[in-house]
């Protein structure tokens, strides 16, 4: 009993120490920590370490970081063709004449484009949706870049559409919604082979597995029968 009481007391004091509000000697420091802690996976204590690290760096280095972030936020574009992040109106992939514009791979965001490009197994274009249909998160079809995709398919300029969303309930729902929108169109619809584990995010797949999934893609309707 004494051991258990000691364990719970130590656990209580640990939580109390880590949950109590931080006390800052500078309001400027506190504001910086609060802003950095809003980044994904960054807590207050990690944010404090990062901010203090920046303070210890040469001033021009910290200012360069700030300028780079500001410049990115103000000047970055989205490709008018595929919605990929770009420095110009048309991204390098869509502007490359050696890429197959009739082959389009549907992905969730820029991280998936980077993951597939790292495999060096795909030479077509992309269409970045900007997310997945997720009613629980308040994300519907109208919040994504689905209308422009459907428009491209109906224009008849594409031969094959590859669904490469993560193997999650939201990913499968999004795939099925798009498929129903274009099922009357004259186009081949495929999905990456399930070398990617069900429930896994595409960006975390290793390059070999992802590359093989692209090469060994299967008709999308076949994937519906297997679920």
Image: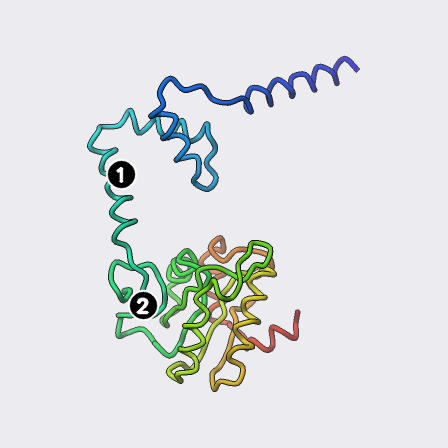
- Residue 126 vs residue 216, the one in the foreground: 126
- Residue 104 vs residue 39, the one in the foreground: 39
Image location of residue 187, percent across then percent down:
47, 83
Q: CA distance from mark 2 to mark 1?
A: 28 Å
Image location of residue 124, percent across then percent down:
37, 72
For residue 131, side relative to residue 96 (left or right): right
Image location of residue 138, percent across then percent down:
55, 56
Going from N to C along the chain, the mark reached first, 2 or 1, is 1
Image location of residue 107, percent across then percent down:
45, 64
Residue 80 tag number: 2
- Residue 174 vs residue 165, the one in the foreground: 174
Q: Residue furthest top?
A: 2
Q: Residue furthest left?
A: 60
Judged from the image, the secondary structure of the residue bearing numbered disc 2 is loop
Q: Is residue 213 above or below residue 74?
A: below
Q: Residues within 10 Å of mark 2 (few under 14, many from 20)?
A: some
Residue at the spot of label 1:
66
> What residue is shown at x 28% (from left), y 55% (from top)?
76
Location of the N terminus (image quadrant)? top right
Q: Residues within 10 Å of mark 1 (few under 14, many from 20)?
A: few
Residue 42 tag number: none
Task: Determine which quarter of the picture holds residue 67.
Answer: top left
Location of the C terminus (image quadrant)? bottom right
Judged from the image, the secondary structure of the residue bearing numbered disc 1 is helix
Task: Determine which quarter of the picture holds residue 223.
Answer: bottom right
> What residue is shown at x 44% (from left), y 64% (from top)?
129
Task: Determine which quarter of the picture holds residue 53.
Answer: top left
């Amino acid at each position: 009993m004494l051991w258990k009481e000691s364990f719970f007391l130590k656990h209580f004091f640990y939580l109390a120490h880590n949950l109590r509000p931080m006390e800052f000697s500078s309001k400027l420091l506190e504001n910086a920590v609060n802003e950095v802690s809003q980044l994904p996976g960054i807590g207050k204590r990690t944010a404090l370490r990062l901010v203090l690290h920046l303070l210890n760096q040469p001033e021009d280095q910290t200012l360069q970081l700030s300028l780079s972030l500001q410049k990115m936020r103000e000047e970055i574009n989205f490709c008018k063709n595929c919605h990929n992040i770009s420095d110009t109106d048309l991204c390098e992939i869509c502007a490359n004449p050696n890429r197959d514009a009739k082959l389009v791979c549907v992905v969730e965001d820029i991280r998936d484009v980077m993951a597939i490009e790292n495999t060096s197994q795909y030479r077509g274009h992309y269409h970045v949706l900007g997310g997945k249909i997720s009613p629980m998160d308040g994300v519907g079809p109208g919040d994504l870049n689905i209308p422009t995709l459907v428009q491209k398919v109906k224009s008849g300029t594409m031969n094959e559409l590859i669904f490469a969303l993560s193997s999650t309930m939201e990913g499968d729902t999004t795939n099925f919604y798009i498929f129903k929108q274009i099922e009357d169109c004259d186009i081949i619809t495929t999905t990456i082979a399930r070398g990617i584990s069900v429930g896994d995010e595409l960006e975390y797949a290793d390059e070999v597995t992802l590359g093989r999934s692209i090469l060994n893609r299967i008709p999308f309707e076949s994937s519906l029968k297997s679920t």
